Amino acid sequence: MNFIVHGFLNLSFWELVLATLLMTHVTIAAVTIFLHRAQAHRALDLHPVISHFFRFWLWLTTGMITKQWVAIHRKHHAKCETSEDPHSPQILGIRKVLWEGAELYRSEAANSETLKRYGHGTPDDWLEDHLYTRYDRLGVTLMLFIDLALFGIAGLTIWAIQLLWIPFWAAGIVNGLGHYWGYRNYEPRDASTNLLPIGLVIGGEELHNNHHAFPSSAKLSNHWWEFDIGWLYIRIFDNPAVGACQENCTGATTTTR
């Protein structure tokens, strides 16, 4: 009975909070480093092992398909702040993007033309075809059982938070507020803004105006008061002792500002 209530780890309340924050932060890191910087913009080359870890983790915690995410994001850059932008608050309104960002994502993911035009160069191996894409909901179902086994009844709440984390922070906050409110270092042809000078909460993605000004850069911070934690992780990966980059994580596509 104790196992059912508290799970295998039998953690206290604050330990459960910490475990939830750690797991959701790994998910944020996977989105910003793997999906965004490495896959969508080719700003760095990750070692196949670390690349596949991120892909597997996203399958477990979000059910997102790499090709869909990449295609939608590339279209966002190509059609930014126009009627063809999948999630522009300047066109659709801030409330819709902020609270219905996940629905906008799913709607665009069903657009085969978007996937065909913008989804090139994404993983197309056996695992992608036979597991991650074909059974995209299996991962989050498996994650539910893992959470229940590790954390007991609290695992259900943790699982729900994991599922809501990216739709809220990425689809809602970055795509919504990141094109509506904040400060600007640059004046690209869009309404992108930086939400916070310290890019911690969403892995550096808060520095959204910087990104739109230099989309091929793996580094999103600019001034001394801006800190991109995603970039810190990339520099750690670039350490030979870690070996998580195929060649050089910074690479030729990294823009120095």
Image (spheres, rainbow, N blue to C red):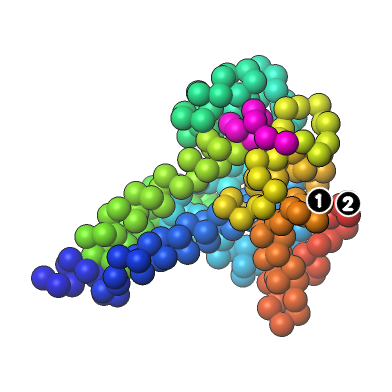
Q: Are marks 1 and 2 in contact (CB under 8 Å)?
A: yes
* x, y percent for residue 69: 59, 42
The span from disc 1 to disc 2 (Cα, nearest Å) is: 6 Å
Neighbor class of circle 1 (other Cα within 10 Å; few <14, some 14-19, many 20+) is: some
**Horizontal side, residue 49 vs residue 106: left or right:** right
Q: Is residue 74 visible?
A: no
> What residue occupies the far left of the structure in this picture?
1
Residue 164 located within the stretch drawn in magenta: no
Residue beneath disc 1: 222
Q: Residue at x 35, y 66 (%)?
A: 14
Q: Which residues are magenta?
A: 176-183
* x, y percent for residue 187: 83, 31
Q: Residue at x 59, y 27 (%)?
A: 87
Residue beneath disc 2: 257
The disc label shown at residue 144, or none? none
Quarter of the image for residue 236 reads: bottom right
The amino acid type found where label 2 is placed reads Arg
**Horizontal side, residue 160 vs residue 55: left or right:** left
